[in-house]
Each structure stands twice: as C-alpha cells, then as structure tokens.
Image (cartoon, rainbow, N blue to C red):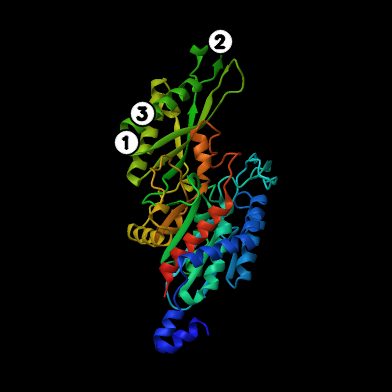
Amino acid sequence: MGDEFVLRRFVSPLVLGCLLALPATASDLKERVQNLYDEQLGSLFVWFHQHPELSMMEHQTAQRLADELAELGYEVHTGVGGTGLVALLRNGEGPLAMFRADMDGLPVEEKSGLSYASKAKQKDWDGNDVSVMHACGHDVHITSLVGTARIMAERRDEWSGTLMLVGQPAEERVGGAAAMRADNIWERFGTPDYAMAFHVASAVPTGKLVATQAPYSGADTVDIYIKGIGAHGASPHRGVDPVVLGSQIVLALQTVVTRDLAPRRPGVITVGAFHAGTKHNIISDAARLQLTVRNESNADRQVLLDGIKRVAENMGRVAGLPEDMLPEVVVHENEGVPPTLNDPAMLQRMRGVWADQFGDSVFFEEERLGMGAEDFPFFTVNPSIKSVYFAVGGTPPEDFEREAQGGAPVPSHHSPLFKISPEPAVTLGVEASVTALMDLMGR
C-alpha cells in the first residue's frame, strides 16, 4: 500500500485531488534539471558551441533548435525575421508568456583551450573567411531554452496558457529583434502578456542570479566624417590636417560626459576606430571616427548626441574650416537600442519567486560597472509588454579568487579566451526560467 492508498482512506476525494496535483518541489525541479543536463543538455551545449554562426546566418543553429522543439510537441515556425523562429505550446486558457534566446556567434577565433573549442569558419557579410565563436554565451541561452521547453512540456498539468519560445537571430549586430518585429511576430503569433530573457555573465559567479531594474544600457552607433585640406607632410601650413582635428575632437568628446551629463548620471562616448591617411608624408584630406555611445535614458541620450554634434562642428570651426566643410555627425538609427528596463512590479514578483526557490543568497548584488547594451527592448516597447531580463553566473568562484591573487584574469565577453562553465550556467538558467514561467502561468 502506497501513500496514495493512505490518502484515499483518510481524506475526501476533493482534497486528495488537490494534494496529488501539487506542483513539484524546489528539490524535485533541481533534480530533474540536473538529470536532463546529464542526459541531453550537456551534449547539446557542446554541439551548439562547436557550430557557431554569424548574425543572420544562423541556419543550422535555427534548424537544430527547431528540430529539438518540434520533437517536444511545440508548433514551430521558422524564417521569422530572417533566421528567427517561434515555437508555441498551447495549453488552454491563460496568459501568453514569451521567453527569448539569442542564437548568433561572433567573428572571433576561439583560443579558450577547451577540448570542445570551436574550429568553425564562415564567410562574413563582406565575403571574407572568418573564424566564428560563441564568445558571448548564446550557446548557453539556446541550450537552456531547450531544457525549459522540455520541462514545461512535461509539466503541463501545472500551468495553463500559451508558452512562446523565441530563437532570435542577430543580437550581436542589434538587428534580430527589430527584424522579427518587422516580420509581424506579434500580429502573427499573438502579443505576449509577459516577456523574459536571460544572459550568462562571465563577471558573475556560477550559482548566482542578477535581477535588477536596469540590466542594460541604451546604445548608439555614430560616425563623424571629417573633411580636411590635403597637403605635403612637410608643408602642414598649406592644408588643414584632419588627423589633428580628429584627435582634438576625440579628446573634446570626453568633456561631453564629464561636463554635460549630471555627475550622477552614467554615460559613455568611446571612439573605437580612427581612419585617416595613406602614407607617412601625406596630410590626408579626410578622416572618419567611429563611436559607440551609451546612455541610461532617452533624455541623457539626447544630451550626448547633441554634445557630439556641437563638439565636432565647433572644433572644425576652430581649425578654420568653412561652414560647408564642417565635420558631419551621422547617427545610425537602425543600429541603436534603448535601455533595457525591467517592469518594477514583475521584477519584484520574480525576485520573490527565485528567493523562494533558491534562497536570498542566490542574488548577486554587486553594482553593474559596464554599460553593455541589448536589443531585447525592441520586443517589449511599442506596445509595452511587462518584461524581466536577468542574468546567470558563468564563471566558477575559484576563478575569481585566483584572479584576486594575481592569477589570470577572467576573460570578458567577446574575448577569444572567453569560456563559460556550462553545467551550472545551463542548469541554473533552466531552473530559474521554469520557476518564473510556472509562477506567471501556474494554475
């Protein structure tokens, strides 16, 4: 005689039904996720890691993801916004909850030393043969998405509504989310009531979650085109040197952050590239600066962009250029993203759910120091969708201890040395995702 017999003997049928239908405990979920990693997700991660693809070229990645989800009974739609996919699991009345994972790799040659390091090569957007690597952890994201999909399918009796899983292309080039929106993802498959995503963070210890109000900054891509007057390098007085002018602009731009933004408002203006000239003794007649600009609000964004234009044009005047030759500032609107801001009420709700599942110590509360950007907001604005974007740790704590003692630094994202400890990152990603979705859609 098992527990069910004892229950049937001493409680009413109604109470018995409720007891037998109780959702799985935290330990049950943890054990299931670990078993799933051992059985499937570990090898799937290695496959994704060894088969990275560039933005909007994620054909085999998208196909493998589609096959995995279709096998679980999801209704899979491919080719959304290029190489994107949408997978739906309809489970009665209830909310529509979306969970997104980005799929693309980077044109980086992997030098991590891992036994399963990527050796993949691909032609880039200009036709060049380049090495490709998952140098930003997107292999963790899509592997975890498959794990989340499987457990949600296994536990349909614990939730109701429609689960929408999104494999997004081209996050690295800030175009995939916008492309999927332009392909009418919401009109075709429904506008979500909730949207979620996560990122694996190399700067966060494994076993930790990051869930804050503003996980990512806004970003703009800006070019400054400088016209000069060419001359012989030995006769600079005969021309206007765009290299000198460009150098003055680079230095003056830093005052936009330090003097135009309020002291407690974050902002970044980084000149990532300076192109000019062809030979030692020739003063060129043109130069180009390539900038990335980061902000935390639309108001601050405008302050920075206005300041860049003012500095560039007026430094041109200082150099003696006529009005029709002043430097031109071009903001590439199609490459900009707004800040990623979590819905306050939903964030508080999710933090409470995760605290119940993992304990309060799961949260990594150190201040965010960088100003990375994400295109996830293109899914959650216009129309406004309640959303939470979180992070899971990807580096073992002992690696940080070794770094603190003078050892090798922990590699950052986009580095050829980048590596993630996959098992704790994937399993925590799945467990946190399932826990959140069960709360949003639970019966």
In percent of width and height, residue 347 lies at 37, 58
Residue type at the position of mark 1: Leu
Task: Note whether 378 is above or below 113 in the view shown.
Answer: below
Residue type at the position of mark 2: Ala
Residue type at the position of mark 3: Thr
Separation (CA) of disc 3 from disc 1: 9 Å
The residue under label 1 is: 261
Secondary structure beneath dot 1 equals: loop
Q: Which of marks 2 and 3 is nearer the N terminus?
A: 2
Q: For the point 35% across and 46% down, which residue is it?
A: 298
Q: For the point 46% across and 80% down, which residue is it?
A: 20
Mark toward the viewer: 1 or 2: 1
Mark toward the viewer: 2 or 3: 3
Res. 234 mark: 2
Along the viewing direction, whichever of 82 and 234 lies nearer the viewer: 82
Task: Note whether 368 is above or below 257 in the view shown.
Answer: below
Quadrant for the C terminus, please. bottom left
The residue under label 3 is: 255
